[in-house]
Amino acid sequence: MGRRGEWREAAPNAAGTAKRTGFPILFWEHDAHASIRAERTDPVEVPVATLIDGKIISAAVRAEVAASVARLKASGRRTPVLRVVLVGDDPASASYVRGKNRACHEVGMDGETLAFDAGLSEADLLALIARLNADPGVDGILVQLPLPAHIDEKKILRAISPAKDVDCFHPENVGHLVTGEAGFRPATPAGIMELLSRSGIPTRGARAVVLGRSNIVGKPMANLLVQKGVDATVTVCHSRTRDLPSVTREADILIAAIGVAHFVTADMVKPGATVIDVGINRLDDPSHERGYRLVGDVDFAAVEPIAGAITPVPGGVGPMTIAMLLKNTLYACTGSFD
Ligand code: GUN
């Protein structure tokens, strides 16, 4: 028997989810109309959130991609090639880009970064993209965002050939996403769909609330969730949403992509909800060597005892983004989206 506030964690299963049981400090009782929070004095074992482990699920996706790349090569085709363009010296972007290249090599792809200083002109960047578009030896092109202020991001993203647009940022590909036609899907929202489906989280008829309306996560996420076959009822919330907690408490699936550390608190979550945390925020913490630690948009410690399933930060959505980029690069190489 454990003590109150102590957790025992089952070994994660092959699907990357682990059911945890423990003795939470607070206990939630709910009936059809109300949730009553009360201090428990007796250590009764209650189920707590299933941890959705993005490291395990992304490893499964990467293994599938690696097997497809091996089959391609065995059939005499060349390896898929991704070119990542990095402009400027933002350390976070440099670190993301290193991760993308490393992941390419691990699945047998050719990934390389073309790095330029922040002074690169918009015209030179457009010329580079035109060269990569025309190069039959390049399958996927990714221009890491954000770009320096003197470069028009929209113009750059429109210049990338839709057939090589592994980010799915070109308006033509965004159109295919909205209409549900075959095509690239943006990596982070597509990764979240994989987390949901491989964790057995039902979406049909579920109420999904997306916190954040960015072009990279919030808007495409809402579009994926509302597609036929996924069949969620979707609400997108943003900075002008009135009485946000009353909206988020409706969610069977709550997706936080707002970019504010610990924004989602316990009172915003319906008991049993699936909570997906897209945020990666630095929180000052002198006890850490670096002086900060990475936390999500969700106050994990407060929300985990209420949620039915939850992603950690780090190790939740983050690893999925890279895995889905690899999938898109494979699609770009084969021209087939299944
Ligand atoms: N910057 C932050 N996320 C992304 C992403 O998914 N793609 C690109 N190109 N840049 C980013």
Image (tube, rainbow, N blue to C red):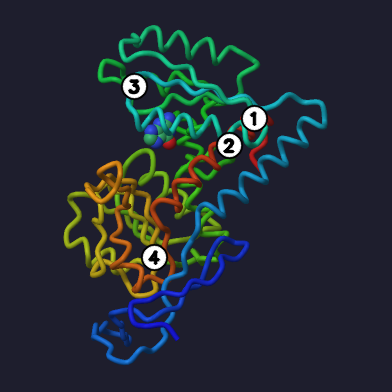
> For the residues marked 1 and 4, what is the alpha-carbon distance in whole angstroms?
38 Å
**Residue 5 occupies which quadrant of the picture?**
bottom left
Local packing at callout 4 (Cα closer than 10 Å; few below 14, some 14-19, many 20+) is some
The reply to whether callout 2 and callout 1 are in contact (CB within 8 Å) is yes
Task: Answer above or below: position of 302 versus 29.
Answer: above
Residue 207 on image: x %, y %:
39, 65
| Residue sitting at x 55%, y 59% | 197
Residue 183: quarter of image: top right
Spatial CA span between label 3 and label 4: 41 Å
Q: Quadrant of the C terminus?
A: top right
Q: Residue at x 31, y 17 (%)?
A: 151
Q: Which mark is residue 326?
A: 2
Residue underneath mark 1 = 109
The residue indicated by pointer 4 is 207
Residue assigned mark 3: 89
Q: Residue at x 50, y 21 (%)?
A: 113
Q: CA distance from mark 2 to mark 3?
A: 24 Å
Residue 29 is situated, as x and y percent measured from the top left of the image, at 31, 86
